[in-house]
Amino acid sequence: MSSTASGAESAASTLSPPVAAKSAWQETRHGEAVTDDYRWLQKKERPEVIAHLNAENAYTEAVTADIEPLADKLYAETKGRIQEVDLSVPVRRAEYYYYTRFEAGKQYPINARRRAGANMAYDDKAAEEILLDQNELAAGQKFFSVAALSVSPDNSLLLYSTDTTGFRQYQLHVKDLKTGKLLDASAPRVTSVAWAADNKTIFYVQEDPTTKRADRLFRMALGSAPVQVYHEAVEQFNMGVRNSRDQKFIELRMGATDTSETRLLPADQPNGNFRSLGRTKGHRYSIEHRDGELFILTNKNAKNFRLVRAPLARPAEKNWKEVVKHDQNVLINNVEVFQDYMVVGEKASALTRMRIYDFKKKTWKSVKFDDPVYLARSAGTPEFSSTRVRLSYQSPVTPPTVLDVDMATGERTVLKRQEIVGGYDASRYESKRLWATARDGVKVPLWAVYKKGVKFDGNAPLLLYSYGSYGIPTEATFSIPRISMLERGVIYVQAHIRGGTDLGEAWHDDGMLMKKKNTFYDFIDSAEFLVKEKWTSPSRMIIQGGSAGGLLMGAVVNMRPDLFHAVHAAVPFVDVMNTMMDASLPLTTGEYLEWGNPNEKAAYDYMRSYSPYDNIERKAYPAMLVTTGLNDSQVMYWEPAKYVAKLRAHKTDKNPLLLKTNMGAGHGGASGRFDAIKEGAFNTAWMLSQWGIKE
């Protein structure tokens, strides 16, 4: 861990960190007596818990006082690069164009619309109608977030939902867009919404107040009390409701890690019964509707999914006709069906791509991009009759770009590229695809971005990030705050480790359940590859991950603390066993199919062998910054708090160990755009200080 000592390290050596009290707690699991000295930190309502978190924050503030000027500088750099007054590309729905815009100095967007002009074109001279000014709604709140945002078919009413704590429990509101007033209709803990065709019936899904599982569907006619339509009893399933693209159906989608079900209700028959398209263990599918025909994206006899079509009235497997065959090297991510065209989103070799099908000509065309690594995806094209599909494109060196693709000709029109205020020259930077060989011989893809001129002699500061869970891939995205790191000579790398779907569904399977350790091995092996190839060295490598990626951080520093100089673990899922043994928590029963059910002895033993909190030992650890939010509903604040308390009692080194808790936010951190930049600037300043970079 040799490196230039930062002020934080010297301050940490003279200031005494908070020492969490120990309180006896014990439970027997599979014959093992399990103790947890810091269980008391799970009692959020107790004053001593808040006092301890405040003490940790005060300690962090004290030992990082010397990096405050750098954090302020990074904040100013990032804030100075964003376009404070900004407008999204307007999107047409029926006779209106909808968009969001930001005003100078304001934290939150304004949602607005204008009536379409001649030939349904966007007319910026048409009167603006503000749907929501989120700055007004957020006034006086420490946290504010809008989730659902849906206009009625006749354009007169707006459904929207708000959270003011960060706990991601959203209250549903209905606004009359003619009068600007809220209706009496409201509902708590709403996760998704859909309108019936009558403009007065709302379908919404509500989550359980304790487990946060989205498990109840309600129908509410405005002016009447809501009626529960369906309850999903199976604990591993969550559900969501939406309108079909052609607006002809209400779709109720239920899903577990390995199984799904879709139910349909004609949108013009809100009091009717939903019709199930089937639920079979292990079968995952989704549907799109077009002219009385279903397009079914299915994993039946197709690990990476295939696309079939079947009559709406007879959707059984015996009536399927194949449209896109299964390919073991290509994962079909999504399908969008329009009146005359279909867009299929795919992933191959950790890169996204898109293909367009012309129903009349029965021909395919591909949308291709040239960067070595990039992210291209659908950007939302709500109109079923559209002949153009909207895409977003970005790469580590290319700012986010919105473009329309003519589905008949393939012609692209760039509508907007995110402006970097003060100028941005992509030619100053380079991105690359790398491949590391894991210990079992599997090739793991990585991507890197850096400022040209960096020397690959093992001395470069390098930040390695990854996630590796839930089938969520690692995407090659652009980041304005990252520019400040690249300009200071930092190499930024992401590893597509197993647990995501970067190389298909098998890539996820090989990093979950009883193969979860592949996720950690892939990350360690990727780090060793970067050292071997002289991209960096252990004394110059910092690692970063959040949520399930925070579990990754905790696991790899237990396994190989010598390989990394410092760690930023954000909202980390580190107390695996205590969480997964408590069925009342959000991240438990629904996660059994991802992590394993610890009530089963084999799964318990395997999970116990890598759980970061349970495998802390008396040894030297890297410098660590652990960040969390008091109102986190996904990974409760006490996981990182307990982890830091236990680690502090066991580690034998003098490297800094810091816990920083946002006392007014949740899993995603600060909600305002400038507050979020400030949080990120502190984290970056701390990492830079660990490399000895002080300006």
Image (tube, rainbow, N blue to C red):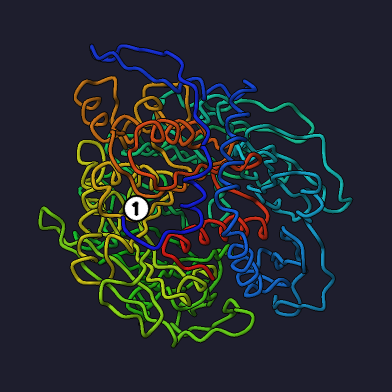
Task: Name the spot of residue 478 as percent of width and height, x first.
Answer: 47, 70
Task: Name the spot of residue 44 as percent of width and height, x first.
Answer: 59, 25
Q: Split into 4 quadrants, where in the image is the C terminus?
A: bottom right
Q: Which amino acid does label 1 sit on?
A: Leu
Q: Can residue 214 be seen in this view?
A: no
Task: Name the spot of residue 57 as percent of width and height, x first.
Answer: 59, 41
Considering depth in this image, is 471 or 357 the residue closer to the camera?
Answer: 471
**87 on left or right of 383:** right
Residue drawn at 30 percent across, 45 percent down: 557
Considering depth in this image, is 94 or 27 the residue closer to the camera?
Answer: 27
Q: Name, please, the residue furthest toward the front.
A: 14
Residue drawn at 29 percent across, 48 percent down: 499
Vertical position of residue 489 compared to residue 48: above or below = below
Considering depth in this image, is 679 or 604 the residue closer to the camera?
Answer: 679
**418 on left or right of 342:** right
Vertical position of residue 84 compared to residue 524: above or below = below
Q: Name, please, the residue furthest toward the right.
A: 179
Task: Name the spot of residue 8 as percent of width and height, x first.
Answer: 50, 53
Residue 43, located in which quarter of the rendered image? top right
Please name the residue that numbered disc 1 is placed on.
Answer: 297
**303 on left or right of 553:** left
Vertical position of residue 46 compared to residue 188: above or below = above
Badge 1 density bin: few <14, some 14–19, many ≥20, Cα 10 Å: many
Residue 188, located in which quarter of the rendered image? top right
